[in-house]
Amino acid sequence: MFDLKLTPAELSDLIKEMDENTFARFLYCQHMSSTFMAVHKLEHTIIIAMLTCDRIKTCKSPAGDVADAGQLLLNKLDELQSSTLGN
């Protein structure tokens, strides 16, 4: 759609040349991308919080194999990441 080496002035000129429908689509895409990024950040924060809680539980549990505990957390991370909206 746009050259990747677009300057702010060139982008401004392109926006000024857009008709009403094209400008509405441009704004829609901007809002959708910012919403997607916000949801991604929220999901990532929730996943990290859940893993942190699991790490605390692991630390409080009776002594076991640390490697097994680490692998369990990695498995949980994979499971959580595969169930996000992006997937």
Image (spheres, helix red, strand yellow):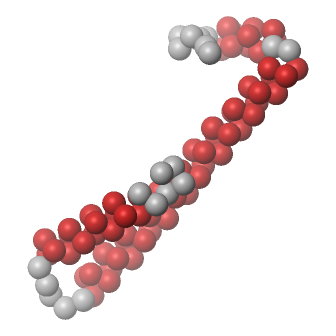
- Name the spot of residue 84 as percent of width and height, x first: 49, 57
Residue at x 32%, y 79% (from the top left corner): 56
Residue 45 lies left or right of residue 62; in this view the side is right
Give me the residue at 68% from left, 13% from top: 11
Q: Is residue 54 visible?
A: yes
Give the percent coordinates (x, y) of residue 53.
Answer: 39, 76
Q: Quadrant of residue 59?
A: bottom left
Is residue 55 placed above or below 35 in the rendered structure?
below
Q: How many marks?
A: 0
For the point 33% across and 68% down, which residue is it? 76
Q: Is residue 75 left or right of residue 51?
A: left
Task: Quadrant for residue 68, please give it.
Answer: bottom left
Quadrant for the N terminus in the image: top right
- Look at 27% across and 64% down and name the residue there: 74
Question: Could one spot residue 48 in this view of the protein?
Answer: no
Residue 23: image location, x then y, percent: 80, 22
Give the side of residue 34 with respect to residue 26, left or right. left
76 versus 16 height, above or below: below
Q: Residue furthest right?
A: 20
Q: Is residue 34 left or right of residue 42?
A: right
Which quadrant of the figure has residue 17? Answer: top right
Relative to 68, residue 60 above or below: below
